[in-house]
Amino acid sequence: MNPNKPLGLTPSMGWNSWNTFTWDINEQLVRDVADLFISEGYKDAGYEYIVIDDCWSLKERDENGNLKADPIKFPSGMRALADYVHAKGLKFGMYSCVGTHTCAGYPGSFEHEFQDALLFAEWGVDFLKYDFCFKPRHISGELMYKRMSLALKNCGRDILFSACNWGEDNVYQWIRESGAHMYRSTGDIQDHWDSIKNLTLSQLDKECYTGSFCHNDMDMLVVGMYGGSNNDFIGSKIGGCSDNEYKTHFSLWSIMGSPLMIGCDIRNANQATKDILLNHDLIAINQDIEGRGAYRIKPEPQWFHSDDVFMLVKVLTNGDLAIGFFNLSDSQRELSLQFWDIGLPYASGISLSLYDCWEHKELGVYKERFSPVVPAHDCLVVRAKLVN
């Protein structure tokens, strides 16, 4: 974590309470997560934000119109909780909504934007997730996000603005100008392979709509949840994913430049989950300083007639390429990358030295093409260096 890095320069990394805990949150949970960020190496890996999602407040504002934290869930108050997180060298995040109410029915920030922004600053908030429920029908969502952005930028504290309008209102056309540092481009993720696959496919033609200071957020990670949510829609009745599917999920979010916000209960994370979430090679790709989107290459059309088998290529700052071979289909496939398709003709005499980002080992030097066999629902991610 670089304290001098400008706000929103690279995709945010952290933990959010919603996917696993939804309404069942409290200050001890947040403190436990902060402690584990230090002891388990999450902070050292780059994760820095600990974010409380919906259901943190009382159902009514106080006599001055201010939001009030639920005293049963958060008896010490939000300022004390933020201080605890900050003392660990981490950052504290909270949640509100453009509408009159949040998605779970708590007070939203509609027509309280500047008041709420000042309160969040007073509490020491560093990150605001801003949802899209209960917006008055005839008011522009675009205007609502511009309004809160202006409020946050004038509240006296640096607060990262995480817009969450689920890809509605043609958000790609105006979100960068609004001042948001990241924006949700999809509906809610579920702890299920089909959800991961569908969210991915929905964003494969949106590579030009992400970059430094305004990152395309494909929703929070479900890695390591294994169906452990207390919410039926998210995953308590779905059953979760396999470790290979979680690995593919993390690889896609990393190479596509999505923020990496952990959604599992890291207090119970097994070694497979930690190995995925703490993969320094994938995190380095996600956090590359230029923040470029990944472009898609489809394999030979005579062999593949669907969109669920493809390669993604991300140009990195030092001249390397991150290349992901993704097989989202239900059967094993061979994916052949012709180097000509990434701008490397055979006549150049240049080869690619490939490093496997999951096995953390060199694969060798290849000329003209590379054709790995990838199991169903799996992937291979390599870092490619040009060599003579």
Image (cartoon, rainbow, N blue to C red):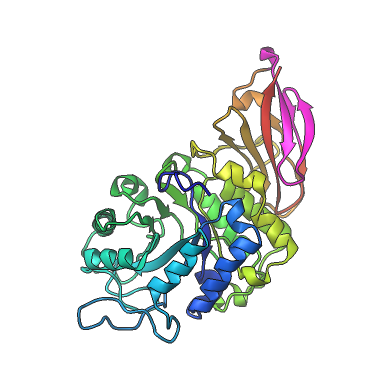
Closest to the observer, 38 or 64: 38
Dividing the picture into quadrants, the one containing residue 115 is bottom left
Q: Is residue 361 magenta?
A: yes
Residue 36 visible from this viewpoint: yes
Task: Return the x and y of residue 253 as percentages of the image width and height.
Answer: 57, 51
Q: Quadrant of residue 315?
A: top right
Identify the residue at image location x=63%, y=42%: 310
Q: Quadrant of the C terminus?
A: top right
Nearer to us in this view, 76 or 55: 76
| Residue 58 image point, x, y percent | 35, 83
Q: Residue at x 48, y 66 (%)?
A: 85
In this picture, which residue range is highlighted in magenta? Answer: 346-371
* Towards the viewer: 363 or 69: 69
Instruction: Please tell me whether residue 112 is drawn above or below residue 175 in the rendered image.
Output: below
Residue 186 painted magenta: no
Image x and y of residue 40, in percent? 66, 62
Answer with left or right where residue 322 lies relative to residue 258.
right
* Residue 67, placed above or below residue 335: below
